[in-house]
Amino acid sequence: MWAFRSLRPTTVFRSSPARQAPRHVRHQSYYRFGRGGQYQRFQQAASIFTRWSARPTFYYEVGGIGAAVGGFYVYHLETVPVSGRRRFNVVSTNMVEITSQQMYAEIMNEYRANILPPHDKRVQMVRRVLDRLIPASGLTDAKWEVNVIDDPQKNAFVIPGGKVFVFSGILPICGGEDGLAAVLGHEIAHNVADHAAERMSNSIILLGLATLVDFALGGTGGLSSMLFDLTFSKPGSRAQESEADYIGLMMMAQSCYNPEAAAQLWARMEKMEEVSIPQFLSTHPSSHNRGDKIREWLPEAFDKMQDSGCSSALNYDEFLQKFRQNSW
């Protein structure tokens, strides 16, 4: 997404304080459920591994498990369109569709009163830009739907299946249809690359690994989850965002929008940021780095425009803009 939507904090229900247990019971509970319990689990896990490693077939079993896991991983590798990156994916299209429908219902329920009518000029602009981008996306079979939300949030996203949501707060930052094409191109690119399925696949793997590590160490209070988040989840998310920037840039260039508008967009985003967290703690690359990468890709984007025969279209758009400025 352009910027992941923050989820509302979950209400935590606490029961009334229970009567304090006798001292000897508390003492036993400490060793059963507290540090003693963690140490006991660690000893059990170590004992299981020791007995397993003593088996004469240990190395064959480890090799067999490794081969099975490796084969499963390789079998589920696929190539991301446009960028050509290889990635792991075990989530089916049906599962993504079910999740997307649930997300769509939640968003519509939350913002239904703030959705602008189809005749609003902002809605018409979003629809006009989207109509030019869709042929370049290859997702012409999706049931596209435009929803512009009257809200100051500087955000936009496209749910798999073609459900477009744009908050009105981001439109001034776009600076026109070319900047809006950069925003929508990026969001559509997440669907082109099927990033939702990839994130779900990675989450399944990381959750399993974190659970195994926590059990083996006797319970670490989620330390392994935090470690995996910093070393795998967040870098993976940043890689997806950068990939969506690249695919979206090529898409807007093929649709005859000015690719330089994408770099200008991120320059404006960088100027308006009051506080920015270190990139390694974020799910997104910094605005500065995104702008730099886009400028590196501009020569390729202009070649894409040339191959798409955009010169005549650009000349017409420039003429039309001047005509409107000079008209009464």
Image (cartoon, helix red, strand yellow):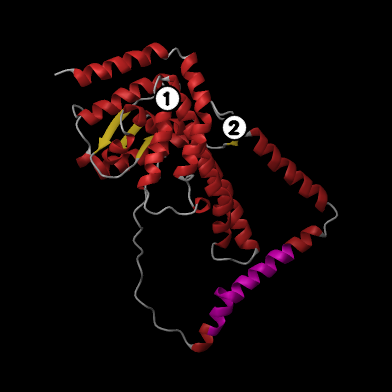
How many residues crowd mark 1 within 10 Å: few (<14), some (14–19), many (20+)?
Answer: many
Q: CA distance from mark 2 to mark 1?
A: 20 Å
What segment is highlighted magenta in the picture? Answer: 27-48
Q: Amino acid at mark 2?
A: Arg
From the image, give the main secondary structure of the stretch colored magenta: helix
- Residue at label 1? 252
Give the residue furthest to the bottom: 23
Pinpoint residue 20: horizontal percent, then vertical percent: 42, 84
- For image coordinates 19% across by 31% down, the residue present is 117
Earlier in the chain: of badge 2 and badge 1, it is 2
Secondary element under disc 1, as helix, strand or loop, is: helix
Q: Amino acid at mark 1?
A: Met
Give the residue furthest to the right: 56
- For image coordinates 74% across by 41% down, the residue present is 67
Query: Which corner quadrant holds the C terminus?
Result: top left
Answer above or below: position of 266 versus 230.
Answer: above
Answer above or below: position of 45 versus 16.
Answer: above
Residue 46 in the magenta stretch? The answer is yes
Residue 171 seen in the current view = yes
- For image coordinates 56% across by 52% down, the residue present is 207
Q: What number of labels is visible?
A: 2
- Residue at label 2? 85
In which quarter of the view is residue 81 placed? Answer: top right
Query: Which corner quadrant holds the N terminus?
Result: top left
Residue 157 in the magenta stretch? The answer is no
Pinpoint residue 138: horizontal percent, then vertical percent: 45, 21
